[in-house]
Structures are given as C-alpha cells and as structure tokens.
Amino acid sequence: MSKMSKRNRRLFITIMITALLQQAQFALTPGIAKIQSEVFPQMSLSTIQTVMMLPSLISIGFSLLSAYAISKRWISKKTSVVVGISLLAFTGLISAFLHTQYWHLILFSVLIGTGMGLYISTSASIIFDNFNEKERRMSVGVQTSVLNFGGILLSAVGGYLASLVWYGGYVMLLVAAPVIIICIRTIPNDKKVLDAVPAHVKKPANTKLPLDIFYYGFAASVFLLVFTVCTTNISNHLKAAELGNTATAGISIAVQMAGGVLSGLLFSKLSHRLKDYMMPLAFLIVFAGYMIISLGHASLALNMVGVFIVGASISVMIPQCLFSVSNRVDASNSATATAIVNCICPGIGSFLSPVIFTNLTMSIGGESTVFRFKFVAVFALVIAVVLLFATQYRSRRKSVKAAAVQPTD
C-alpha cells in the first residue's frame, strides 16, 4: 500500500471502509432462531431462512440494473455506491419504527438487497479500473478480510441486540450513515471524466464479456450455495445441542468471519503460488469445517473451530474469482463482470442454499442439523474434486495455446 499513489491510497481506504458493511446481511442471521420461534412462530424455519437470504436474490436484479446504467453512462459508479450505502442506513432508520409485522421483515430484506446490488459489485469494479495487477491482488484479499472483520463487529453486537429486541441487528445499519459522506468525498466520478472527453476523441467502446467470466461466476454460485449453510443453520445447530442462546450464535458468526479475516490477509501470497487451485482448496476447507461441526456437535469449542475453518474458505474462493476476472476485463465491462461474479451468481447461491439444502436434508434425515452439515460436507468434497480436474484441464489448455502462439525458428 505504501507504493500506491496518494489518490489510490485514499480510494483504497474508502473501498475498505465500504467493505465493513458488506456482511450486513449475514450479520443479521444470529437472530433467526428467535425470530422463527418467538416473533413469527406461524412461519416455518425454511421460510424465515429464505426471507433472511432474500437480499441475495434482490441484489441480483439491482446489480444488473446498476451495471447496465453504468455501461450506458446514465449514472456513475460513484452514484451507484453512494445510493446503495444510503439504502442500508435507511433500513436501520425505519427498523426502529417498523418492526411489528411479517411484511416489515420482508421490507428490510428488499432494502438491504437493493443496496447490496447497487454498491458491492460496483465497488469491486472501481478497484479493477484504478489499480494495477499487484494492487488488485492485494486489494481483493484485504477487502475480504475487512468485510469479514466488519461482519465480526456487526454480528457480535447484532447478536447481542437481537437477544434484546429481534430487530436490533437492523437498527445497527445506521452505522452506514457516515460512510455515505466518505464515499461522496473520495470516490472519483467516472461518468464525469468520460463525459469530459472531447467529441473528436473516441471514447472507449464496450467490449464483450469473456466466457471465463461465467465460469468463475458459476463456481462462486456453487460456493455460496454451500457456504451459506453454516450461516443459516448454526443458530439452530447450537440451540438443538443446548450450547447457548442467540448471543452465542452471534459469537459463532463472528468466529466464522474471523476465519475469513485471517485467510484474506494470507490471500496474496497463496494466490501468487496456487492461482486457480485456490478454488478447489476453498471447497476442501468447507468440507473439513462442516465435518468438525457435525462430529463435534456436542462441544461448543469444536463447533467454534469448525465454524472458523469454514469462514476461512470465503477469503480463499471469492478473492480468487475476482482477481482472475480482473485480468480478463477492462473499464468498459468491469461493472458487468463484477456484477456477475461478485453479486448475481453468489446471490443466487445464497438464496437457493436454504431452499435446496434445508428442504432436501429435512426430507432425507429430518430436522437434524448434524446430518445437514455432514451431507453438505460430502457435497463440498465432490465439488472440490470436480474443480481440481477442471483447473488442471484449463491450465493445460492455456499452456497449449501459449505454446501455439510462440514464434518458431
């Protein structure tokens, strides 16, 4: 970071501050058990889980909408980020007054999802547009660490507040208010810069998205499908084992994110050596974490170890997908590419996770979260093997292409 220009250093700090809020959705999940059993007992667990994951689905539409508006230069990336963060702050404000009806819970999810869709993928594309390769690799790793650290703070305090009032975690989103001012002051207005280019100078045309973008997007989607199982089930898992209350669940989510903080700080060095082999490694880490959670279900300490290991996987998988994508896009299509890989595909995975795994495992093994974690652990192991062979194949194909273009004597 010391080698960055003064402008890029300010921009880096701003993006990291916005990253502190990116886990807002998952920081609210410690209250799932209380919301389902005490606030809306008429609703099933899978229904509450699905509503809590609704922001992932909502964010898909708005990330597409913002990417399209940015590509048409109707709005700037700066505007998209500022509006998105403003919606998070607005959610915190209205939750203090609207918290008595089931539709209020849905409203919160819609507002959070809209905000996430507008600013998360766009902030990543700002990194792609302004930083060189070394700065990008460092930034995506640190960003993942920062967003997990933010999640630790939000989930720990949010879990405590949710133990007092179920909507306490939502009120916490008011911390987004000062971030709005920081973004307004430091993020460059890319639309203004492009519009200032003289008419006789050709402006950059939009280029087509490489097919690789969809490969990384699909991988990210499957990863979030698996990863979200921990977030949406750990509260009920601990409750079933009588290992704590809502506040304990909040601490477990914080421990999960602590794993993401640690691996994110190590990402740059690991990625430089392993490259896309980081992806099967991430699924292997999930497998290990879920097996520990299921086998050590009666021990709070073992549960926390397993949760920590699972949390480490996200800072292995998502930054690698983003970095690989950053090397395949330019300023004209980076917003769309990051929307696909960092919001749309992960959003689909997060939303479908309880729909698929909760319902599937309940039909096979009943309500046991122990069985659910074991089932998903095996699934993660299978995906790790598939990705290992896929990465080997793609690496060999790349080597063959590189050799084919080498000049012959």
Image: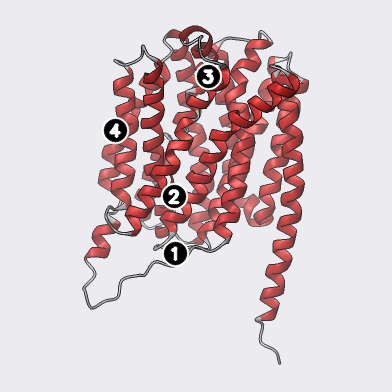
Q: Residue beneath label 3, please?
A: 30
| Circle 2/circle 1 CB separation < 8 Å | no
Quarter of the image where one finds residue 128: bottom left
Secondary structure under tag 3 reads helix
* Crowd class of label 2 (few under 14; some 14 to 19; many from 20; radius 10 Å): many
Q: Is residue 167 above or below residue 4?
A: above
* Mark closest to the chain's N terminus, 2 or 1: 2
Q: CA distance from mark 3 to mark 1?
A: 39 Å
Which residue is nearer to you in this view: 55 or 332? 55
Marks 4, 2: nearer the viewer: 2
Secondary structure under tag 2 reads helix
Quadrant that contains the C terminus: bottom right
Q: Residue beneath label 4, please?
A: 178
Q: CA distance from mark 2 to mark 3?
A: 27 Å
* Residue 154 appears left or right of 181: right
Q: Residue beneath label 1, please?
A: 330
Q: Residue beneath label 2, please?
A: 124
Amino acid on which the number 3 mark rests in the picture: Pro
